[in-house]
Image (cartoon, coloured by chain):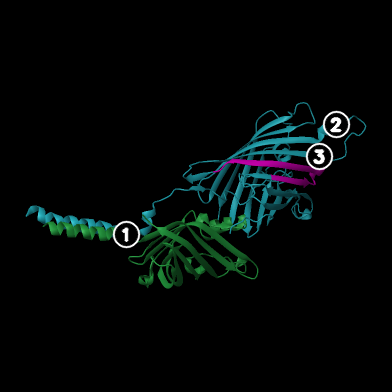
Chain colours: A cyan, B green
């Protein structure tokens, strides 16, 4: 009798188990873990002056027009600096999703510049957990001003400067990203012999999102002591990123008028003080064009 | 008593064969299309999960929002960051029912027109949807095809005034999945 009563119970348990499974069909397939790459740590590939950890996507051309105006302290007569502008325009192109190349031309010191950026680590979660993104940036710049002293022997190499920079950063959450940029600027020629040809600095850049399309950016570049002439300042910039479809507008205040590494890292002379004689309003406008479309079908 | 045991086994076996009527895929193709005179946007995801239970007519889909691929990288970024918020809502799912599922015969090749209805969850918002679908059986495999439209606003996805002419209010969704027997 005992055995007899057990069987229907067992049977009901089995049936109810198999019904419980029916509730969620998808669980039958199991969870497959994927690598979940973190995207959009910054709106564009620049924080303000500094390169951000973002690279330009494969096949995308990013056309940039950047301005830095005369000092705010010039006041109304100069419309707070707007009457005098340094201009850099440039093209950034994504060779792949991790390699970006770029060229640009600045009116300041009539300088041409070029760079290669290789993003060798991508922050990710899921199947591969990587807390950081990391990129290596190498830039060079050629000053094409007429020689100051045409009479003495001048070397072409004196016009050149190079920058090597490591970018380490993390998007902590949806709105907050932070990066460190240890930097070395090498100038072939410096003005006086107390200045170092190799200048070491540590940059910090951050982004705080205010809404989906607006963010506050800030960056500070700390120069290690005893490398540059008196009067050279650490570069501090703060600004707003506004994204509108294919454009990103970056509006900011900075004590540097140069928009390339050699200039804003090692040659910033503006001072942040209440006279605003060393602070400049400026903007970067980024417009992207998809040159090579991704095959999706 | 032996008869009862045998009977119970038979019943269990029949339940087993019922569960063998499940079909699945992990490579379902889900695409969507937003057409406006200014901009055509389409996204494709070819790694969607789907399970169909022919014994009950239950049908379920799940897809990773980040898995949608676009022609333009910036579209993909905006899709994830600004519209679908894929970090907050990583998955889109459909859980529903084929109304006239008994018409489907896996043992015979052929096409069956069916009606599917159920809950579609996108961007954390669940809405009832229903659509016509075509089930095509060929050699034990089931091909499921459907096209329907949803209103972006229904799913709490905000389109700012600045880009309202570039993004359609009603987005067409296309499903194309080939299901194999689940063993």
- Disc 3 to disc 1, how far (Cα)? 75 Å
Expressed as whole percent of the image width and height from the top left, the position of residue A287 reads 69, 56
* Residues indicated by labels 2 and 3 sit on the same polypeptide chain: yes
- Please give the label number shown on residue A143: 3
Decide: marks 3, 1 in contact (CB < 8 A)? no
Q: Is residue B67 above or below residue B127?
A: above
Q: Secondary structure at mark 1?
A: helix
Q: Secondary structure at mark 2?
A: loop
From the viewer's perspective, tell me whether residue A219 is left or right of residue A20.
Answer: right
Tell me the magenta residue range. A101-122
- Main SS of the magenta part reads strand
- Disc 2 to disc 3, how far (Cα)? 12 Å
* Local crowd size for mark 3, using a 10 Å CA cut-off: few (<14), some (14–19), many (≥20): some
Residue A236 appearing in the image: yes
- Label 1: chain? B
Identify the image quadrant of the N terminus of chain A.
Answer: bottom left
- Disc 1 to disc 2, how far (Cα)? 82 Å
> How many numbered discs?
3
Identify the image quadrant of the C terminus of chain A.
Answer: bottom right
In reply to whether residue A26 is colored magenta, the answer given is: no
Q: Which residue is mark 2?
A: A155
Residue B123 appearing in the image: no
Q: Which residue is mark 1?
A: B19
Of the pair B136 and A93, the residue shown nearer to us: B136
* Local crowd size for mark 1, using a 10 Å CA cut-off: few (<14), some (14–19), many (≥20): some
- Label 3: chain? A
Expressed as whole percent of the image width and height from the top left, the position of residue B77 reads 58, 55
Residue drawn where x is 69% and y is 28% of the image: A226
Q: Secondary structure at mark 3?
A: strand
State the residue lying farthest toward the top: A193
Quarter of the figure with residue B23? bottom left
Labels 3, 1: front one: 1
């Amino acid at each position: 009798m005992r055995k007899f009563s057990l069987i229907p119970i067992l049977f009901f348990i089995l049936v109810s188990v198999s019904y419980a499974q029916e509730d969620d069909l998808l669980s039958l397939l199991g969870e497959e873990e994927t690598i979940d790459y973190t995207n959009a740590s910054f709106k564009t590939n620049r924080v303000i002056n500094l390169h951000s950890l973002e690279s330009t996507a494969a096949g995308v051309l990013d056309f940039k027009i950047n301005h830095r105006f005369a000092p705010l302290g010039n006041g109304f007569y100069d419309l707070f600096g707007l009457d005098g502008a340094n201009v850099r325009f440039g093209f950034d192109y994504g060779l792949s999703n991790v390699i970006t190349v770029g060229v640009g031309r600045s009116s300041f010191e009539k300088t041409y510049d070029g760079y290669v950026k290789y993003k060798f680590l991508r922050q990710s979660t899921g199947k591969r957990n990587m807390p950081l993104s990391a990129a290596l940036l190498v830039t060079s710049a050629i000053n094409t001003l007429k020689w100051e002293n045409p009479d003495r022997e001048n070397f072409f190499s004196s016009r050149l400067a190079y920058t090597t920079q490591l970018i380490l950063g993390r998007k902590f959450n949806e709105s907050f990203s932070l990066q460190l940029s240890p930097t070395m600027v090498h100038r072939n020629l410096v003005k006086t012999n107390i200045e170092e040809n190799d200048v070491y600095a540590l940059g910090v850049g951050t982004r705080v999102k205010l809404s989906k399309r607006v963010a506050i950016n800030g960056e500070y570049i700390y120069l290690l002591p005893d490398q540059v002439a008196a009067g050279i300042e650490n570069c501090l910039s703060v600004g707003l990123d506004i994204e509108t479809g294919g454009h990103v507008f970056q509006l900011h205040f900075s004590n540097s008028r140069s928009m390339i590494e050699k200039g804003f890292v090692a040659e910033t002379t503006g001072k942040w003080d209440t006279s605003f004689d060393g602070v400049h309003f400026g903007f970067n406008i980024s417009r992207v064009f998809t040159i090579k479309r991704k095959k999706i079908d | 008593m032996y008869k009862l045991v045998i009977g119970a086994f038979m019943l269990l076996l029949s339940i087993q064969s019922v569960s063998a009527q499940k079909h699945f895929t992990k490579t379902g193709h889900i695409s969507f299309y937003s057409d406006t005179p200014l901009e055509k946007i389409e996204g494709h995801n070819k790694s969607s999960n789907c399970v169909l239970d022919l014994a009950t007519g239950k049908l379920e889909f799940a897809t990773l929002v980040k898995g949608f691929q676009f022609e333009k990288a910036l579209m993909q970024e905006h899709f994830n960051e600004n519209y679908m918020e894929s970090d907050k809502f990583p998955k889109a799912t459909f859980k529903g029912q084929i109304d006239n599922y008994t018409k489907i015969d896996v043992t015979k090749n052929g096409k069956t027109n069916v009606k599917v209805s159920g809950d579609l969850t996108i961007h954390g918002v669940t809405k009832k949807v229903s659509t016509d679908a075509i089930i095509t059986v060929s050699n034990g495999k089931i091909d499921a095809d459907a096209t329907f439209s949803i209103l972006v606003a229904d799913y709490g996805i905000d389109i700012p005034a600045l880009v309202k002419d570039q993004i359609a209010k009603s987005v067409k969704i296309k499903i194309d999945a080939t299901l194999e027997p689940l063993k």
